[in-house]
Amino acid sequence: MAQKKSRKRSWLSKLLLFILTPILIWIFAFAIWFFWRDITRLLGGTDQSKAPARDSRKGEKITAPRGNKSQEKIPEEDRRKLDEILKHR
C-alpha cells in the first residue's frame, strides 16, 4: 500500500498557530468586554446601569431617601447636648 505523505509545517505556521492565535483571541475577548454595553444596546438588551442597585451581600434593593431630606432631624434637646460636648473638646 502507498503511504500518505505528511506535510511538514514551516516554522512560521507553527508560530502563527501557537503564539498569535491566543493573542488574537485575547484581543477579541477584550474588545467584547470593553464594548459590552454598546453591544447589548445594539442587540436590544436592557441597560444594566439604569437598573436599581442591589446590596451584593443580601441581594436587596438599595433605596435612596425620598425628597430633599439630606440631614436627619435631631430634637433640640439632643442638639444642645451635642453642642455642649463639642464645645468642651
Image (cartoon, helix red, strand yellow):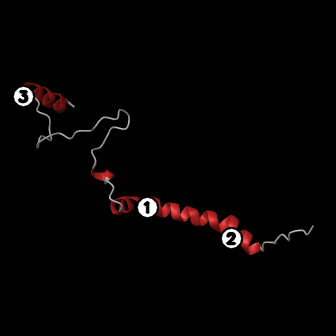
State the CA–CA distance, disc 3 to disc 2.
76 Å
Within 10 Å of disc 1 (Cα), the crowding (few <14, some 14-19, many 20+) is few
To which residue does mark 2 refer? Answer: 16
To which residue does mark 1 refer? Answer: 34
Q: Which amino acid, by three-letter code, is at mark 3? A: Glu
Whether residue 58 sits left or right of residue 6 in the image: it is: left
The residue lying at 73 percent from left, 74 percent from top is 12
In this view, the mark in front (1 or 2)? 2
* Label 3 SS: helix
Q: Which amino acid, by three-letter code, is at mark 1? A: Phe
- Which of the two labelled residues, at mark 1 and mark 2, occupies the earlier sequence position? 2
The residue nearer to you, when weighing 73 against 58, is 58
To which residue does mark 3 refer? Answer: 76
- Which of the two labelled residues, at mark 3 and mark 1, occupies the earlier sequence position? 1
The residue lying at 41 percent from left, 59 percent from top is 36
The residue lying at 6 percent from left, 28 percent from top is 76
Res 50 label: none
Residue 86 percent coordinates (x, y): 18, 32
In this view, the mark in front (3 or 2)? 2
The residue lying at 15 percent from left, 41 percent from top is 70
Within 10 Å of disc 3 (Cα), the crowding (few <14, some 14-19, many 20+) is few
The residue nearer to you, when weighing 83 against 58, is 58
The residue nearer to you, when weighing 70 against 35, is 35
* Label 1 SS: helix
State the CA–CA distance, disc 1 to disc 2.
25 Å
Residue 78 percent coordinates (x, y): 11, 26
Whether residue 48 sits left or right of residue 64 in the image: it is: right
CB of mark 3 within 8 Å of CB of mark 1?
Answer: no
Which quadrant is the C terminus positioned in? top left
* Label 2 SS: helix
